[in-house]
Amino acid sequence: MKHLLCVVSLYVLCLYGCRSGEVNIKEDFMLLAGPLTKQLGVSGAFNCSHPIPPGSRQYFEYLKRRGVTHFKVPLSWVQLLPTGLPAQPQQTVVTCYQTLLKQLVEVGLQPLVVLHGSTVPEVLRLRYGGWENQELVEMFQQYAEFAFQELGAWAHYWVTLSDLDDVWHDGQTADASTSLKNVLQLNRNIYQLYHHRFPDKGRHLSIGLRTNDVAILSQIKASTKMDFLSVHVQYNCASTSDFAKELKSLQMTTGDLPILIYEIIDDCLYSQFQLLSDFLQVLNNYDLKIAGCDMMDMLGKLDMKDSPTSHDFSDYNGRTALRNSYQRVWERFEAQITTERDVFLNESFPFGFQWATSSESFKVEGGWSEGGKGETIWDRFAHENKVFDNQTADLACDSYNKVDYNVYLLRGLHVNTFQFSISWARIFPSGHRGSQSERGALYYDKLIDALIESGIQPVVTLYHWDLPQILQDHGGWTNTSIVEAFKDYADFCFSRFGDRVKTWNTFSSPWVVSHAGYGTGEHPPGVKDYVVASYQATHNILKSHAEAWHVYNDKYRTKQGGKVGVALNSDWAEPMDPSSPEDRAAADRYLQFMLGWFAHPIFVNGDYPATLKTQTEEKRNKCPHSEPAILPVFTAKESQRIRGTADFFGLNHYTSRLVNNSDGGCAPGPQGVGDFQAHVDPSWSSTASDWIYSAPWGLRRLLNYISTEYLNATKMPIYITGNGMPTEYSGDIFNDTGRIQYMKSYINEALKAIHLDGVNVQRFTVQSLMDGFEGPQGYSERFGLHYVNFNSPDRPRTPKQSAYFYSKVIEKNGFLPKTQYLNIQGLKNTGSNRLSSIPPSTVPSQAKDVWRRFSSQSNFQRKIYHYGTFPQGFSWGASSSAYQIEGGWNADGKGLSVWDSFTNKSGSIPANANGKVACDSYHRLEEDLYMLRALRVKSYRFSLSWSRIFPDGQRTSLNQKGVDYYNRLIDGLLSYNITPMVTIYHWDLPEALQDLGGWDNVDMIDIFNDFCDFCFATFGDRVKFWMTFNQPHTIAWSGYGLGQIPPNVKKPGTAPYKVAHNLIKAHAKAYHTYDDKYRKSQGGLVSIALNADWIEPKDVNVPREVTAADRALQFQLGWFAHPIFKNGDYPDAMKWQVGNKSELQQLSESRLPSFTEDEKSYIKGTADMFCVNHYTTKIVSHATLRLNTQSYEYDQDLSEAEEGDSPTTAISNQRAVAWGLRRLLNWVKEEYGDPEIYITENGVATDSKTTWDDSARVFYYKTYIDEALKASDLDGVNVKGYIATSLMDSFEWLNGYKVGFGLHHVDFTNPNRPRTPKYSAHFYQQVIKDNGFPTPDDEKQLYGNFRKDFIWSTATASYQIEGGWRTDGKGLSIWDKFAHTPLRVFNDDNGDIACDSYNKVEEDVAILKQLKVTHYRFSISWPRVLPDGTTKHINEAGLNYYHRLVDALLAANIQPHITLYHWDLPQALQEFGGWENETTIVKFRDYADFIFSRLGHKVKFWITINEPYNIANVGHGYGAAAPGISFRPGTLPYIVGHNLIKAHAEAWHLYNDKYRAEQKGIISITINSDWSEPRNPYKQEDIDAARRVLQFYIGWFAHPIFNGDYSNMMKTIIRERSLAAGLPKSRLPVFTPDEINRIKGTYDYFGFNHYTTVLAFPVEYGDLQHYDADRGAGTVADRTWLDSGSSWLKVSPFGFRRILNFIKEEYGNPPIIITENGISERGPVDLNDIHRSYYYEKYINQVLKAYLLDDVDIRGYTAWSLMDNLEWATGFSERFGLFYVNQSDPKLPRVAKSSVALYSTIISCNGFPDPVSGPHECLNLQPEGTNAPVTSASPPSDNTVSFLGMTLSANDAQTGLYATFALLIVAVFGAICSSCCFLKAKKQSKKNIEYINMERKF
């Protein structure tokens, strides 16, 4: 049958020759072949992204000889036109297709060209959708025109879309009819276009159909045109008659068009000749007009051994294939000499190639016990000290907390795929679904979502070696039950993540698991059993893989459309002696024992390789008493289930081996059983690993072997899932040239396998993304493209040179130069954009309104955070400048600049720093682009080095290499869609020009213009945003006035003005040059970057101070902005000041130069936008400065000071005053006519010691950017962009390298200048991603109600309000003594009278009724009822006060909630040691017994002790509260806390045992705590610190009471620190087992006081023994959180919900009564306490969220406090009250603040009614004590008006208005008088006591 093709072809041609007259295209009956499946790529199109494979012509000639007439050539739309635009083709692809068509025509084959398959390419679908989009349809028509133009000369037969049926079915999910209609019309258009272009005969065009498309054929016929039918036929061997019927039906419906059988689809088994026979019968049917058929389909299943297939023709030589795959591959390559083997192939990878890097869970994640993660075998292995240097993976790279960090690196790297593994134990801690950890799953959700959002496809490995230890305890992979466990785990992963993950590896390198884990025992679980366990592990792994594949195939594939495979590892093996058949066979065995062990069952026949089974059987017979291997056997069913369970072949490959034959005897293991030995060639390059040697050619050979051995019958792709090499821990860690060479060689070998051998490789994965925990080697070996500093808790990641190399390979898609398709903005500004003239500023300017609007803001109004986003298209960027970053100071012909000269002088800069190298950006462009890609900025502001382009400043000295550098930079930016924002001059004047006088020389105007002209002409085709100068103010004043910066001229009275004059004119001339010569063609924007501080007047109410502030702005900003943006002249404020000063100095004219009228006209409006650099705010006041010294500074007549309340920075006089930015932007808007504003510099300096964890910079950006948002969103300022300063640390001018502004840290001590992203870079990237600050869920209001019996309360404490300190026999308390001790309480305040509540029961109850509370929490003064603390002496008068109070409350229907102890211990007990003395426990029990017996029948709510933390630590550790003890901070707080817990327990048991049954009350303790968040949420060390803060705060007392005993964390830390300090035992007392049992569970609810949140970070205190050192954490507040009257209390509502959830999770969801929550104020009294209303609304809403959304069992809420009172050590200076108590009035009246109305409304509504439901009745309740409202029986008459909510007659309303106005005047007058009295009293105060702000209220 070898000539069957020729025979059949001849027969068909003869048959048709007899009836040629009946066929329209009779002369061209088509016997089809093709396409070239060897290079099938995207959507079945021929992959022409690289040259046509060798041997193609010979293959075509072979087909021609055998009668084939036509050959299919499917084109790739996306390869030909990557952007979709015919103007931007990929020329190499065009050439490839042209070459292919020429070859066909030359050998006599006619091409049948297919424009496209059918489905829309994914890259276009994401942008346009489907065929229903008319824009996409038009793009395809343009593509068709392009294809006809480029390829039409060689092809006469065309198919537009190969399969219309796919369009129809693809449209079912959208608008099917629209899609079909569009496609048919499209085909009609293309048909007409084609025949119009090629009117000659013999041209034919069709569209592809299927035989089952009969239903829509009538629509097709009516809607489109074609010359023949191109048909896909579904052949059914069981019903052969249908074949002819279907073809006949098609032809009849379409009007007898000839039919081309394009493809025969057949998946049934038939006899060899059945299809051929049926086809020949069809040909004999004279009713059918068959134009041709695919002969390869027709004969495809016949045995034609001499006929090469289209995927292996390059090997075609007439030789029959050898049976042994290894021999076949080896013989192909054995003759290669070294030079031939190693020749480098400069080619590109196929279009759409996947570039990846990888990581593995246990190597990088850390967080080993986070989120409930279970222990893994690697955790156990490392904790048993089996790893190098006893290292563990507990923290590893901290990737569990650094998802954003890792994705940042991936964006910089530019990969399109990331492969990572899931930790089984993080998802299922026990290995089984029943233990599922939602937090573990959420981590992977976050990672996957972040990858996809960044355009990176996730590839997930289900198992990479880290088995849950619990499963290993039951045998691990040797236990057959693990198959079901793994199947269930895979099922969960598919269901949870499969909607986003489309590629899965079940296992990665399972050979390592079996070999090293269960064979040699080198890896965990450390089993050394290569006889049984290793083979059994493999057996179960294979079955587990198969089950996972079937789960996906059966349950998920249809819906998710993904792929599942396995990543197998294998070396390449070569014979030690190439001439030895035995060594060749041994090398083959090596591969079978390694790769075949797993690949053969999956990819071949479901069973182990014959070689493996044979060797094992031989050894069993040879070694009957010591079998070296027991190979399990698959059942037939198992084999069937395993076979074919892969959608791709994943390959991990690192090295090769030389193998020789040997006698392994009876030794177990692969070499013993396999009878071979493996070696390495000494000439191969070594690595840090003793098993990886570089032999790159092995990869190509292995790929060929895999393709031949396992994939010869399929089109299955190969994914290289791992390739890399390790370097040593030490050495040149960043300049990893060895890795670069390794990668380059191995990647190139993969390229050769694709190009030269036709292997279908579709992905290359470099291992790994970053250094990690490398198993037994720990951190001593490093595989990473990024260096991880494991010595730093920040775990910073820094790109190595290999990362930059790899990103470049990815960018070029291989090794050919990349064709740039630059994304340049269209011409948007082709007309003149000069701003219209604006009248000059008045003195002060009209913009003074900004001070009126903003300067009177309260701190609350000023600081409240605004959530929102910037307008679409907002430009986010980062900045740098040439001298600061470029280095290369004399490289490639660059000339000297003034900064080069200046810094070369010793002593000019600290540490003699200079910019000779700086960041070395001149040589590290790729590294800079990497950072910008990772940041995803939209713009990059940089400056041009004048002396690099014109070394001597003049055009005649042009330095082309300098120009080339900037061209590369600009092109690189545009290739990543980053807009270049170019500053032409940023201070680095060529020294040669300074020799001519620099900017003091008027000639510089023309010289600068010539430089600008050159820049516009050279770069302007791509640069659309220009700034002529950066901060001309700095140039003029610092450079020519102060002489601080080059050129260091000190002429403060004249030179600055003259230089500024020249700079303004130079700017104007450059602007006009652009406007006149380039704007029309280039369409860019030109401006100037001006710097401005915001200036705040010292007293906004003093007009002279406002004028001074305005003058300061005019001298700084207006100096340049006024001429350019207003009228072409200086502001009058400047002209008057300098002119008057000059005259007073007896000068003949002003030192300020003047512009001529022509110059003014020329200058005004020379800016297209307003660019402003801003950093800080200053406070100024008017001052008369000296006359005898001429100076710009003294001309201003003002004094300047820092804004003292704002944080300092690393640069003096540059505080972070965020609110100034909003005001400055408003001032610019008002002063300069609402221009478009770009903030072109804003940032903060940190000390050089601040490397990666720059939280201060995060706070800075968080606040400053929000102020810009306020200006944009609230004030209507036209802010268009924000540029963060700066991209990276750099040479910071006069500060050298002492400070850094960078988002990236640069190590200036390392010659590689490695760049590492800081915390701020990730923060800023998130801001860019969000386009601002969208409202977080935490800030969104929840509407709903609390439970019906919810407790609404407010609280006080006895010492704080009662007074009567010696009344009616009350005894002294420790607070009486403390407050009467000098310097203990602020302002010498005390509680002698306090609020006098002892005498004001009725008044207090009245305001409680006004508040509408259901409960009132107050405390009993122990010494008031038991003056000496014991029941020996009872003070009935004191007790009677509480009886009166309780009775009054009950009468008002308010339940009393009594605290037994709120810090006022009887002094008599303190004399005996107080709470340090255990006898106080008994005394407290007796006191409680007495109170229960006397008041318990009326009181149902009890608290034993309030805030034991403060008693123990603040009172007995810090000494900031009574009793004021601070000299034993390491022991006494813990002793006191111990006794407090026991005292509480005794009181609880007393009530429980003696009173509960009768009194039916509830009792507990109130514990206080802040919520604690990590300062840096990406950092495990900060997360751990936050946990310690909580456990040492709330956990200190809650853990023993709710869980039993102190927490393990507290016990362990304090014990270890105590012993380390040489103490014999822990400083933390120990509870006995009986005490633990007695204490645990002593609660009826969780009483909880909460006020604020802190940000925690670790602090190391050395050997100091005290509470803070034990806690090991410091705390700060977020700068965006609102202040209060207490330094420790910041408004942070979100923390409330989080700590309530913490209580739920940590303590078993107990009932919670919030027993305190509130906010303070200090300073002048303002009854309109909006900050308190805000606080309560936000905090209570968080409580509602915890209750409704989180199911936290919250029973009540208590506001602290009812009234202003003695706030402990701060006296009366801090006021927490809902009611104001006037301490200056002897009557101490209680006056409601505005917050009373808010809180009472929340109480009335029992929450927050939804406004969508309409006004709720609870919002309209009448005030307490008013009469019922009077309703009108009839509508108001026409002469009525609405006044203050009342309907009144016009006369009555007028009277009311006058009366209100009169009262207002009286009120204002009274307020003024009160203020005067207050100020007078303040001045008379003789003491200003400093006090300590400690925890909570101290």
Image (spheres, helix red, strand yellow):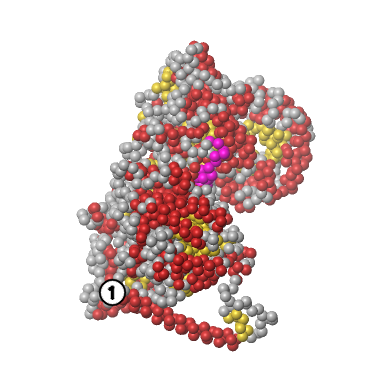
Which stretch is magenta?
431-450
- Along the horizontal axis of the image, is 900 left or right of 1566? left
- Estimate the x, y position of residue 717 in percent, counting from the top left: 55, 33
Q: Between 1685 and 386, which is closer to the camera in this rendering?
A: 1685
Q: Between 62 and 123, which is closer to the camera in this rendering?
A: 123
- The answer to whether residue 156 is above or below residue 1835 is above
- Along the horizontal axis of the image, is 247 left or right of 1229? right
Q: Between 935 and 398, which is closer to the camera in this rendering?
A: 398
| Numbered disc 1: secondary structure | helix
Amino acid beneath label 1: Asp
**10 Å neighbourhood of mark 1: few (<14), some, or many (≥20)?**
many
Q: Between 339 and 14, which is closer to the camera in this rendering?
A: 339
- At 72% from the left and 45% from the top, the residue drawn is 220
- At 50% from the left and 21% from the top, the residue drawn is 532
Q: Is residue 1416 magenta?
A: no
Is residue 1663 visible to us here?
yes
Quadrant position of the C terminus in the picture: bottom left
- Estimate the x, y position of residue 1169 in percent, counting from the top left: 43, 65
- Residue that mark 1 sits on: 1195
Quadrant position of the N terminus in the picture: top right
- At 56% from the left and 73% from the top, the residue drawn is 1824
Q: Is residue 439 magenta?
A: yes
- Estimate the x, y position of residue 358 in percent, counting from the top left: 46, 39
- Estimate the x, y position of residue 521 in percent, counting from the top left: 43, 26
Q: Quadrant of residue 259?
A: top right
Is residue 1004 visible to us here?
no
- At 59% from the left and 51% from the top, the residue drawn is 128
Most common secondary structure along the magenta stretch = helix
- The answer to whether residue 957 is above or below residue 1200 is above
Q: Residue furthest front?
A: 1432
